[in-house]
Amino acid sequence: MFRLLILASALFILFGCNDSHTEQQTLTVPLVRLLQISPDSTIAERYFPARLEAAQAADLSFQVSGKLVYFPVIKGDQVREGELIAGLDQTDYQLLLESTRVAYAQAERDLNRLEQLRSQNHVSQAQLDEARTVYDRATVELDRAKQNLIYTEIFAPYDALIADRMADKFTQLAAGTPLVRIQDLSRIKVEIAVPEMLLPQVQDPAGYYVTATLPSVPDRQFELSFKEYATEPDPRSRTYRVTFDMENPVDLRLLPGMSATVRVALMQDKDPKEFDNRKAANDPETSTKLDKSEDIAGLGTMENMTEVYLVMNEAGERNGAVLHIRGQGLWGTMYGLISLEDDMSTVRGVHFYEHSETPGLGGEITNPSWVKTWEGKELYGDDGKVKFDLVKGGASGEHEVDALSGATLTSNGVDALIDFWMSDKAYGPLLDKLRKGELTNG
């Protein structure tokens, strides 16, 4: 599991240097707690019974009454956002719409005629005002008829699972009668009841590590992220409901109502200055062996925790981050740092400080001219996925940088290490939390 360490010291990194002078940027870095996943760092642990809940759920109903004539979904069906779930008989509503259109057209003609007559002083102002009122009323009625016709259909508001059906086809339904319950199961909420004495610690996500186990798969642990907590206790137990969040594994079918056991491990503080991410990656006690299918950067093992530098401005506000990156090149591992703007997507600079690539070919990863082309490039696309790419033949897009000439394997290695470290397997979740302001300086 990949965790976060932030180094508490001034950081000096070279970005965008050239042959004539070296530009040195000083980054002021705040102290944030080290989260260590190992038995030695756990000072206490508690276990809580829990239940699983859908990330979001809703009971859908029609806003108008009518006979249910279209209802193809059944319990357990998956529906996509915007997919038609149910529909009423539209006959009466279509007739009403045509009737209001006729009335609207008549009101519009009457108003136009009276406006012309009024301009010639053939009718009074009161008659014209009355015609305008009739026209405005007809406009409202037409809009209402159009909207009511729209209300005869129910569309999925998001990707969801059909959890329950409350009526059958051809049933006469009143407006507001619950028809179908949907659940978003892309993520799962896990709720536990926490005693009053533990609530202050739960409010500090940096101070603990939470996992859940399920009776159906007792050998697997699922990492949980803090989501929210209730500020009022249960009147009987005097405990507070705390909600955690987890991804719903694609290889399992976790459903609301399932039971779980939540382990909350309180973590002890460590001095981040003592941490060495390279040693951590090579130590079996502090690293994880990567599966070949996911090890696109050729790392072999990945440290369970790493260090991240937060860049602060003079006002003490965060305005960027600097991340360690590494990956296999042609002749060995390439080690570097990448600096990001505060949107955690725009590249501020990159610096490969150690490598074994061929001088004049792959070794050009340190060429200031090539390094400068990274500035301002975007790592992520609009869908939140890594889109950055090294391309041959001239980069043109905001996500592209020129590949190194005559160094295909080195270029592929750089491409792969960016894809890996910015993905959900590495920095992706952290950057998302920084982007949303969910991670604060401890």
Image: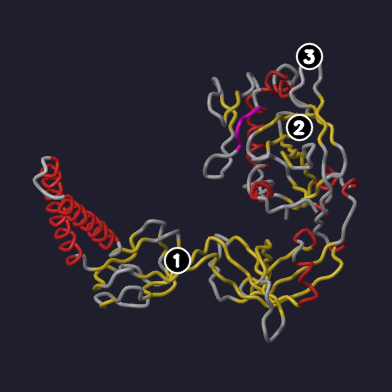
Report whether 352 appears left or right of 109.
Answer: right
**Residue 220, position as x, y percentages in the image:** 67, 66
Disc 2 packing (10 Å; few <14; some 14–19; many ≥20): some
Residue type at mark 2 is Gly
Secondary structure at badge 2 equals: loop
Query: Is residue 75 shown above or below 7?
Result: below
Sequence-first disc among 3 and 1: 3
Query: What secondary structure is found at the residue carrying circle 3?
Result: loop
Q: Is residue 45 magenta?
A: no
> Residue placed farthest to the bottom in the image?
236
Q: Residue at x 75, y 42 (%)?
A: 317
Q: Earlier in the sequence, mark 3 or mark 2?
A: 3
Give the number of the disc on residue 161: 1
Q: Could you say where residue 435 lies in the image, as x and y percent from the top left?
A: 65, 46
* Residue type of the residue flagged with mark 3: Asp
**Pointer 3 residue:** 19
Assign the C terminus to one quadrant of the image. bottom right
The Cα atoms of the two marked residues, 3 and 2, are separated by 26 Å
Q: From which residue to which does the magenta span run?
A: 375-379
Residue at x 65% of width, y 75% of height: 50
Q: Which residue is mark 2?
A: 332
- The quarter of the picture where residue 307 lies is top right
